Image (cartoon, rainbow, N blue to C red):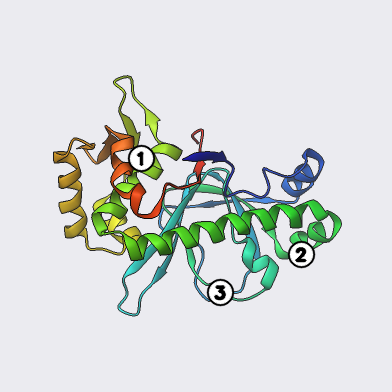
Amino acid sequence: MLGLPGLHSWISRLPDQVQTAVLGAMARRRVAAGEAVYTLGSTPEACYMIQRGRVRICNTTESGREVTLGELRSGDCIGEVGMIDGLPRFNSALAAEDSELLVLDKASFDRLYAAHPEIARELNKLLAYRVRFFYMHAEESRALSLGQRLARLLARTAYGAGIAQDNGEILVEPLSHETLANMLGGTRQAVSREMKRLERAGLIRASYGKVYVLDLEGLLKPVEDLIGAEAVVPTYTGD
């Protein structure tokens, strides 16, 4: 895996002068855990940079079940697609915990976009990265079982955002079985069974709502021959 800091941020990659102009035009907004940043079908009025906390990107099925598309963290940007195409939001963004956002309204975005061509270049890169991720996830859903997808998700999270422990284990942030099920398109019961299987294999350890990865290579190896290792994953230095 190739870790890339700021993978989900177009703002952090701008030249210093342009980045200063963008950040100077942004307002602060606090959102409580579970509160919507924006909702499916709403008119895009702003884009956002997560300054603190985590935001879950999700959709809801006709039966009312939430499908989690991903979680973004401090430094990541969300909502920029609506600034470009002006179409209604095609997913919802919900605070996964109490969070603080920087908000760039549509008028300010348009003004800065027109004034600084560097913004368009960085947005193009960001959207290209996301196309790669969507393609990767589509391949995973077709080629891998639930257990294999779970192992790959835990390995990605550990590699990009895990916290190394003194004993060599890697702490993965708290991820409930329900959250994992929503991210993987399975049931909570099925995810629980697969978590137990990974524990018995000595690949992970679950304790008090936390997951520790014991063998990162072991999580990835069984599926690398099927669809290949990922080229790029986001990395974080912590909130």
Could you tell me if the residues under marks 3 and 2 are in contact, i.e. CB atoms within 8 Å?
no
Which is closer to the viewer, label 3 or label 1? 1
Confirm whether residue 36 shows in the render: no
In the image, is 224 to the left or to the right of 92?
left
- Give me the C-alpha separation between circle 2 and circle 1: 37 Å
Identify residue type, mark 3: Ser
Q: Nearer the viewer, residue 89 or 146?
A: 146
Instruction: For label 3, count other residues whose C-alpha is less than 10 Å away and answer few (under 14), some (14-19) or many (20+).
Output: some
First in sequence, mark 3 or 1: give its number.
3
Other residues around mark 1 within 10 Å, as few (<14) / some (14–19) / many (≥20)? some
The part of the image, by quadrant, that contains residue 213 is top left
Residue designated by label 1: 173
**Quick check: 99 left or right of 204?**
right
Residue, x 40% and y 35% (percent of image)? Answer: 162
Q: CA distance from mark 3 to mark 1?
A: 31 Å
Q: Which mark is residue 107?
A: 2
SS of the residue under disc 1: loop
Q: Secondary structure at mark 3?
A: loop
**Near-viewer residue (194 or 148):** 148
Q: Amino acid at mark 1?
A: Glu
Checking the image for residue 42, the label placed there is: 3
The x and y percentages for residue 26 are 70, 51
| Badge 3 vs badge 1, beta-carbon distance below 8 Å | no
Q: Is residue 101 above or below residue 236?
A: below
Q: Along the horizontal axis of the image, is 7 left or right of 218?
A: right
In the rendered image, which quarter is residue 171 located in? Answer: top left
